[in-house]
Image (spheres, rainbow, N blue to C red):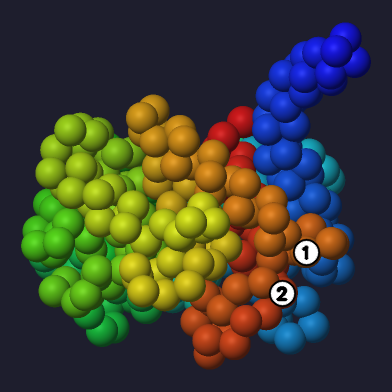
Amino acid sequence: MKKISFFVILLIILIPFVVISAPKDTLKNATDYILSVQDDSGAWSRLKGEFPAEAEPTSWAIKVLAMNGIAPDKVEKGVAFLLKDQKPDGSWNSNTAYAAFAILGLKQAGKGDEAIKKAVEYLREVQDNDGGFKRIGKEGAPLTIYTAVVLCALKEAGYETKDPMVRKAVDWLMGCQNADGGYGMPKGAPSLAPSTAWVIRALLAQGVAPSTPFIQDAVGWLLKTQKPTGGFSAVPPAPEDPEITAFVIIALSRLKDKTDTINKAAEYLAKVQQPDGAYISATPMQFNKVPKKNTQTTCFVGWALSELK
């Protein structure tokens, strides 16, 4: 009887440590993988050996490493690549997301103030008249996910709703909410978890109250995409995916009442991590819906878990 009691007591003592340490182990494994795939140029690729090293994945890797205060020498090399790769107009590849993520990476690393200012002016120049942002400069339709990422970047760079560019973008996003509470990619398109998650993150970052329908209804829709495993899917009928799950954790991490939901999602990420610390996903558009072990998903998982520290 004493042995049983001792065993029970031991479990009670150890279980909290297991629950708390699991995400940290997952995060360390992810950052170890990210470090292992840095290119000699200092940059990162979405998938080493299959895609070129470029600014966007480099920005994600820099942000994750800097969030955790690890490998400053590798961060420095990544920053040097970003600064060299910036175009005279302030963009990276004339791509809105590249510019926004570069701002986020550089701010996290505490580097590149002039490059950030140039990137903000580029974004100001390409903003749609209605307030949204497109994927490539002024080409195509404005998209919620890119507008949301830009707003996150502008917040980190010190631009808030008093700035006309920010105010217009926030107003445009608020006007994009679907009747079901979610947000599609272009305005009026069916709701998707990636766009809904990033809109939640952006609106919260720019001071929209969690109690507003823009947040509450969006979160309600997003929760419908969580599976029994704890992972999240792009739409309710689809299977769960680690990159989508990372986006949701990034979105919900600032909502104190969603701790249980986030913990389940983090447990799912721990279970599906590959032995080398990487993640398999079909989410990156460049993969044409073919699941691949890749740096992009691993970076977003690392970012998401870093939010929980």
The furthest residue to the top:
2
Q: Nearer the viewer, residue 155 or 80?
A: 155
Using the image, determine if residue 159 lies above or below residue 270.
above
Neighbour tally class for label 1: few under 14, some 14-19, many 20 plus, Cα within 10 Å:
some
Asked which quadrant contains residue 49, the reply is: bottom right
Q: Is residue 65 left or right of residue 231?
A: right
The mark nearer the N terminus, 1 or 2, is 1
The residue wearing badge 2 is 293
Using the image, determine if residue 213 lies above or below residue 210.
below
Residue at the spot x=85%, y=13% of the render?
1
> Which amino acid, by three-letter code, is at mark 2?
Lys
Residue at the spot x=52%, y=75% of the render?
283
Residue at mark 1 to residue at mark 2: CA–CA distance: 8 Å
Q: Verify CB contact (< 8 Å) between mark 1 and mark 2.
A: yes
Q: Position of residue 19 (x, y in %)?
A: 68, 33
Q: Is residue 92 left or right of residue 181?
A: right
Which quarter of the rendering shows the C terminus? Answer: top right
Using the image, determine if residue 69 lies above or below residue 84.
above
Q: Is residue 77 left or right of residue 163?
A: right
Q: Position of residue 233 (x, y in %)?
A: 44, 66
Q: On residue 274, which mark appears?
A: 1
Residue at the spot x=60%, y=53% of the render?
268
Instruction: Specify whether residue 242 is in view.
Output: yes
Q: Secondary structure at mark 1?
A: loop
Instruction: Specify whether residue 83 is in view.
Output: no
Which of discs 1 and 2 lies nearer the camera? The answer is 1
